[in-house]
Image (cartoon, grey):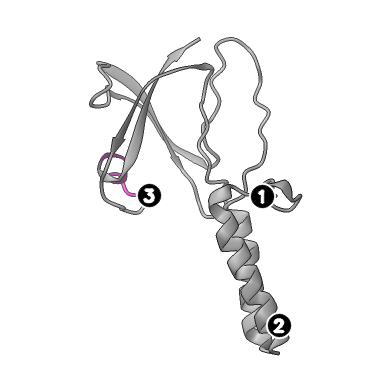
């Protein structure tokens, strides 16, 4: 049996399972040892970690030509830019979305389509709210063809 088979874990991304379980076990151990402030802190960290890795089901509208947000968060800008390197596109639309720690950190496909290419680009780890982050941070470029 996998953790994702349990009702509590089916909505948490598998990458988060070990963190939630580890912090949960620490919470129980600290509680049994009577370490009042430490088990409460560990419990808060367990809840926060479970919340961070949550992966709720989404039900986007199914209409031709519909484009939905690929991520939770706040839209910072929508601009026309030169096509991303390696994509072969002359121009594209860039939508910058800032995800806070309280947003679901899952990116989904914004439209129905077929993935043509995926390019991994290693990079830095600048804070996501900096302009240079979108150009210099580690990222994947996914080139899709609309259906």
Q: Residue furthest right?
A: 7
Q: Which residue is found at the position 63% from the left and 12% from the top?
A: 63
Specify start and end residues of the magenta stretch as a single range: 130-135
Q: Which residue is found at the position 66% from the left and 89% from the top?
A: 35
User: Horizontal and vertical percent for residue 135?
Assistant: 26, 39
Q: Circle 1 sits in a helix, a strand or a loop, which is it?
A: loop
User: Horizontal and vertical percent for residue 95?
Assistant: 41, 31
Residue 94 against residue 44 in the figure, above or below: above
- The numbered dot on residue 129 is 3
Q: Earlier in the sequence, mark 3 or mark 2?
A: 2
Q: Residues within 10 Å of mark 2 (few under 14, many from 20)?
A: some
Of marks 1 and 2, the one in the foreground: 1
Question: Can residue 113 be found in the magenta stretch?
Answer: no
**Distance from Cα at disc 1 to Cα at disc 3:** 36 Å
Residue 48 against residue 88 in the figure, above or below: below
Q: Nearer the viewer, residue 101 or 32?
A: 32
Provide the residue designation for mark 2. Answer: 31
Q: Circle 3 sits in a helix, a strand or a loop, which is it?
A: loop
Provide the residue designation for mark 1. Answer: 2
Q: Earlier in the sequence, mark 1 or mark 2?
A: 1
Q: Position of 56 compared to 98: left or right? A: right
**Distance from Cα at disc 1 to Cα at disc 2:** 26 Å
Q: Position of 86 compared to 18: left or right? A: left
Q: Which residue is found at the position 23% from the left and 26% from the top?
A: 85
Q: Earlier in the sequence, mark 1 or mark 3?
A: 1
Q: Position of 58 compared to 140: left or right? A: right
């Amino acid at each position: 049996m996998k953790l994702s088979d349990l009702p509590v874990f089916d909505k948490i991304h598998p990458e988060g399972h070990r963190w939630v379980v580890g912090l949960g076990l620490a919470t129980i151990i600290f509680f049994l040892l009577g370490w009042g402030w430490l088990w409460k802190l560990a419990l808060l960290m367990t809840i926060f970690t479970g919340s961070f890795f949550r992966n709720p089901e989404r039900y986007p509208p199914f209409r031709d030509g519909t484009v939905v947000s690929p991520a939770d968060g706040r839209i910072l800008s929508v601009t026309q830019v030169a096509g991303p390197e390696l994509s072969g596109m002359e121009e594209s639309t860039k939508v910058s979305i800032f995800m806070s720690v309280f947003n679901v950190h899952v990116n989904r496909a914004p439209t129905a389509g077929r993935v043509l290419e995926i390019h991994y680009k290693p990079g830095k780890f600048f804070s996501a709210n900096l302009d240079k982050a979108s150009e210099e941070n580690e990222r994947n470029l996914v080139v899709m063809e609309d259906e």
